[in-house]
Image (cartoon, rainbow, N blue to C red):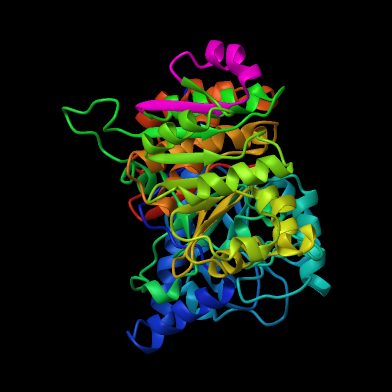
Amino acid sequence: MRAPAVYGRERVALLTADEAAALDQRARSELAIPGRALMESAGRAAAEVIDRLHPAGRIVAVVGPGNNGGDALVALRSLATWGREVAWTAVSERSPDHQLLAGADLPRLSADDIDAAFADAAVLIDGILGTGSRGAPRGAAAGVIRRMNESDRPIAALDIPSGVDPTTGEVPGEAVTARATIMFGWPKRGGMFQPGRGRCGRIIAVEIGFPPLRDDEVSATLITPDWARLRVPPRDPDAHKSSVGRVLIIAGRKGMAGAAAIAGRSAVRAGAGLVRLVSDEANRGVIQSLVPEGLFVDRADDHGVAEALEASDAVLVGPGMGTGDADRAFLDGILADLGERGCVLDADALTLLGAADAIEGLDGRFVLTPHAGEMSRITGLAVGDIRRDPLGHAHALAASTAGAVVLLKGAPSLVAAADHPVLVNSVGSSDLAAAAMGDQLGGMIAAFLAAGAPPREAAGLGLFYGGRAAELARRGRGLTPDDIAEHLGAAFDHPGPERPPLELPFVLFDQPARW
């Protein structure tokens, strides 16, 4: 059985609460799209999704006083029109405009009836708080959220689970734990990052009539199957090993042959036509046995290293190479002779470069691949601060360079470059939390660079196809870098469905529950 896959159009924006509000305002003011029309579209789309996910049984909506509650009422009215048994309850005396019911007489529950109605429902609709909410839910909203979660019934949240910050993903108090979250227009950033992601369940983003987003309205976009499928560098019919990308990997001090071998195998599986591995002579036997396709170069052979660099299209430097003075001098020599080649700086190479002042001069040839700890050493920021705002800090680091790309590893990982929206990965899971996965990723990115992908795209492709291969391997917590390498071919063949799994044409993005 094939692993559950993400579906996504080529361009799927990932919006903050402010960006979502600005888009809504532009639709209403500049383009004269009535707010009621948007609400009707959102509610009906939500109803169709809910009907597909839960085709039988009673549906109970919990309705807040704002637009989110209005969306819920429209959804409930549509479901009732289609013959579904429905009921609703309000969390405050101030309810949405009853005209949204269009004359439909939908049963309204009293406070005394709520728990029994929840227990008897096939699904609950969370229409309590929308993307305009801030801080922890209070009063009646907090209480009903707790009762919804305690009912143990599946919950469909509208736009964002109530209690989850739509921009940061923080959960400062009570919050709905949804089985599915139906996001209107575009996914919300807080739904993609922990702990908010864990409250969303399946994320389904639906088109509701918003105008196309301008580039200056988007701070982040998702790396989707369509995005990746369309950016894999093509091969000419008469391609040969030297025309599809030659990779040089500088990795593995004495006793660290594994890092070099994993990166080398990854580059081979990702499509590199020729892979050379520069490492300590003591590692030759291990590396050549594990990567028989690769050409070994003794790191102590200055002439051999120079020839290998000259004959390569892209370079990966860092996995297990060492962090001593001699290693820094060796790295400096490689960077001085790099020419126009793309270069991935990973692991020990990042440690050798050290602080931000050594990063500032790196230009558009470079991809930096830090995890939060390495980024902390580079920037001086606390790891906790980086994790609270990974997009902002990654983009700031990229902007501080002379054009380098920053791939910040996390859950999810992301790619930042100055003057571009941040790319956020949509595949992968905590199964990837294992040693040497960074070596695997670095080899893939180098292979895409060598094949001609621009650095930002090469980084995004490495993230996506590595994550998709991990899904297809289906190893769970036992996942290894070898499993990813072995399943890259299947990932290239099956990056994800080309049509929405629910067979609803207005679905823009559909991601199974994660992490």
Q: Going 72% across and 54% down the picture, which residue do you hit?
A: 195
- Residue 466 sits above or below residue 198 on the image: above
Q: Where does residue 341 sit, x and y in percent of width and height? A: 40, 47
**Observer-nearest residue: 304 or 2?**
304
How many numbered dots are placed on residues in this image?
A: 0
Left or right of residue 229: residue 160 = right
For this rendering, which residue is in front, 242 or 125? 242
Q: Per the image, is 505 magenta?
A: no
- 392 vs 416, left or right, is right
Q: Is residue 382 visible?
A: yes
Query: What range is drawn magenta here?
Result: 273-294
Q: Is residue 181 left or right of residue 326?
A: left
- The image quadrant that residue 189 belongs to is bottom right
* Residue sitting at x 45%, y 62%: 13
Q: Quadrant of residue 289?
A: top right
Q: Quadrant of the C terminus?
A: top right
